[in-house]
Image (tube, rainbow, N blue to C red):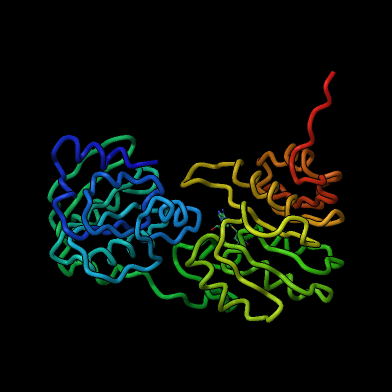
Amino acid sequence: MASPRLIHAVETGALDPASSARALLLEPAADAAFDAFGTHDLTAQQNFKPSYDALEAQGVTVVTHATDPADLVHVTVPRSRDLARGLIAQAARLAPQGRVIVDGAKTDGIDSLLREVKARVSIDAQLSKAHGRIFWFTPGDAFADWALPDPAAVEGGWITQPGVFSADGPDPGSQALVAALPKALKGKGADLGGGWGFLTAHLLDLPEVTHVDLVEADRRALTCAERNVTDPRAALHWADATTWGQARSLDFVVMNPPFHTSRTPDASLGQAFIRAAARLLKPKGQLVMVANRHLPYETTLAAHFAQHAELGGDTRFKILHAASPNATGAAPRRKRR
Ligand SMILES: C[S@@+](CC[C@H](N)C(=O)[O-])C[C@H]1O[C@@H](n2cnc3c(N)ncnc32)[C@H](O)[C@@H]1O
């Protein structure tokens, strides 16, 4: 959603981003308020593939890692505190004497971020709007120590980076899924939303698995996966799993699908992943997935597969298995009465 705070700040005359010659937007929403930045040299940095593609389709210059100096940098605050700090450090590095605008929702911690920034530099102005806040300042060299750490080994030797899903080590849901994986999985499969590669690495331990496509939208997570998964039977794809791949081409899909949009639980993401799995699987293909127990996936599984069942789980997670996707991967049509 275009930032209502940025629009408000521009409409009230508090902020005039269009007066800056070189503007950079760090991780903006696909429909960011680009008009506010005028017709100058505008670049967006975006690491989430669906948003990257949507920005590019609008004619915006998009990169995954911006390095050119700018006069103005707009930071969309992400959920991860480490990543938010890293983006502010990057903004400060690229526009030390320019203007850095930080824009985020209260639920993403914008208020505590403002307190932390204020402890380092003086703020030019701030506005509250739409359950969030926008503030701006000249950063100088006050944020170098906030730079996002490079990917590094955590528990178990896995390479991860702050800001990616389950950055501290394997996710408990994914661990439960690995423990329940049918040992007879074989042939060619995919790990949709594969993150930094935990599930793919375990799939490649199964003796009859010949190939795994790890499909992940977060470029930073995929960069970690490239180091965790070096088996030649794996292919890593920076792609939107809901549209990736060739229909009816896979023997199995394994996944721990995303279940949040920002901080809000969102079952529609997992449901879109189930539809993608049904489309990708061969007629006898099978899906194995883990989900938080409260997420309502069974109706979608029933609509897209001839069989589905719970393989196991506990009070937090359920491991779901589905087989024989419908011919089109689409929901069956209701019969006319
Ligand atoms: C719950 S995490 C699981 C990550 C990994 N499989 C694991 O077990 O640790 C879901 C992953 O899906 C990714 N994701 C979200 N939306 C996506 C999309 N449209 N296409 C591909 N990946 C996506 C997220 O970046 C995240 O890494």
Identity of the residue furthest to the top in this view: 337
Using the image, determine if residue 22 lies above or below residue 129.
below
Q: Nearer the viewer, residue 264 or 220?
A: 220
Residue 32 percent coordinates (x, y): 34, 46
Residue 60 percent coordinates (x, y): 35, 55
Using the image, determine if residue 235 lies above or below residue 102.
below
Q: Nearer the viewer, residue 316 or 138?
A: 138
Tell me the quadrant of the picture where the N terminus can be found.
Answer: top left
User: Which residue is found at the position 62% from the left and 53% from the top?
Assistant: 243
Q: How many numbered marks, from 0 up?
A: 0
User: Which residue is found at the position 15% from the left and 46% from the top?
Assistant: 16
User: Which residue is found at the position 68% from the left and 63% from the top?
Assistant: 191
Residue 278 percent coordinates (x, y): 75, 50
Tell me the quadrant of the picture where the C terminus can be found.
Answer: top right
Residue 133 percent coordinates (x, y): 27, 42
Q: Nearer the viewer, residue 240 or 254?
A: 240
Q: Which of the 4 image quarters holds residue 294?
A: top right
Q: Is residue 295 left or right of residue 121?
A: right
Ligand 1 visible in quadrant: bottom right
Q: Is residue 134 left or right of residue 260?
A: left
Q: Is residue 307 left or right of residue 6?
A: right
Q: Is residue 234 left or right of residue 7?
A: right
